[in-house]
Amino acid sequence: MHDFTVLVLPRAFATSVSITLDVLDAAAGLAPGLKMPKPTWRVVSPDGGMVPLSSGVQVATSAIAARARPDTSTWIVPGLGVDRPADLAERLADDCATRAIAAVRRHAARGGAVAASCSAVFLLQAAGVLQDRRATTTWWLAPELRRIEPRCNVDADRMVCADGPVSTAGAAFAQSDLMLHLLRTRFGPSLAHALGKVLLIDGREAQAPFVVPSMMSNGSELIRRLTQRIESSLPRPPSVARLADEFAMSQRTLARHVRAATGLGPLALVQSVRLSRARMLIETSRMTIDQVATQVGYEDATALRRLMRKAAGATPSKFRANLQAS
């Protein structure tokens, strides 16, 4: 029996697949020195053989078994390489994807564990394993996941979410965070900790520090205009009531449109724009934290520190220190 089954679809994001396999390979190399068993894995696809990935890369695979067999491995689906909500339905409707979805559904129905990151989380949704569970995905696709799976508690702030046998992760490079989590779960913290040190990767907890509000529009002209209006008004952002008046709608209607497109309320969208500007100033300027707070509309740094601690898991000073150390 294997510990992991890596399920690869044609045109999957090559880096996500490579991260998965490289992390497993490195873990197998480290395990003997820690007096631990080596992780074992197999790479499968609906048809088997050489599977073309993005960027002209290929990977050798075995075919998924036609019938479900006893399988205690955790099935891992790397990112599909799809960035836009409009492309997801088409991608998941092709023949390879539908057979992969059916295989994941069979594995989960037998109590098997499943994991995915980025757009591959939508394959888990299509397999019916996200209902009544907490999950994450890349932050700009989170509103679409909320729309098509209202019974899933989508927590886009998290880098990795684990809910029973289902583990999900954020944007494509969160695959490394997902792999550390899966190794920690299966083999304990020692192997995951050693691997993080050797590969210079560490389990990040939040996606919030990486959110770009303007990218949350998902094609919504209203959200694009709202974020531009908020950004251009800093350090004195308009109130929600003022925004509703300017866009000729009630506050309730504004809130409904904003939440449908982004998963946020209007006030949270304003805060996200302010936080994004603050992060940019912290990263690119030599302003003090108090000066940054003033630039994004806070009277002092206390409110900014509180907001960043809640959204990004670090104070502005710690965020800058981490950047300087990296």
Image (spheres, helix red, strand yellow):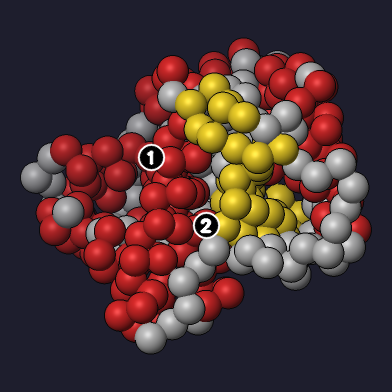
Q: Secondary structure at mark 2?
A: helix
Q: Secondary structure at mark 1?
A: helix
The image quadrant that residue 266 belongs to is: top right
Tell me the residue that label 1 is attached to.
276
Q: Nearer the viewer, residue 249 or 162?
A: 162
Q: Residue at x 14, y 58 (%)?
A: 325
Compared with 140, 85 (above or below) is above
How far across and how far down the image is residue 278, in percent? 31, 44
Compared with 236, 224 (above or below) is above
How far apart marks 1 and 2 lie (CA) works out to 25 Å
Q: Amino acid at mark 2?
A: Leu
Q: Amino acid at mark 1?
A: Ser
Tell me the residue that label 2 is attached to.
178
First of labels 1, 2 by sequence position? 2
All told, the count of numbered labels is: 2
Q: Residue at x 38, y 75 (%)?
A: 31
Name of the residue lying farthest toward the left: 286
Residue count near mark 1 (Cα–Cα under 10 Å), binned few <14, some 14–19, many ≥20: many
How far across and how far down the image is residue 235, in percent? 33, 36
Residue count near mark 2 (Cα–Cα under 10 Å), binned few <14, some 14–19, many ≥20: many
Q: Nearer the viewer, residue 230 or 128?
A: 128
Q: Residue at x 59, y 45 (%)?
A: 43
Q: Nearer the viewer, mark 1 or mark 2?
A: 2
How far across and how far down the image is residue 164, in percent? 75, 70
Q: Which mark is residue 62?
A: none
The quarter of the rendered structure image containing the C terminus is: bottom left
The image quadrant that residue 121 belongs to is: top right
How far across and how far down the image is residue 188, in percent? 50, 81
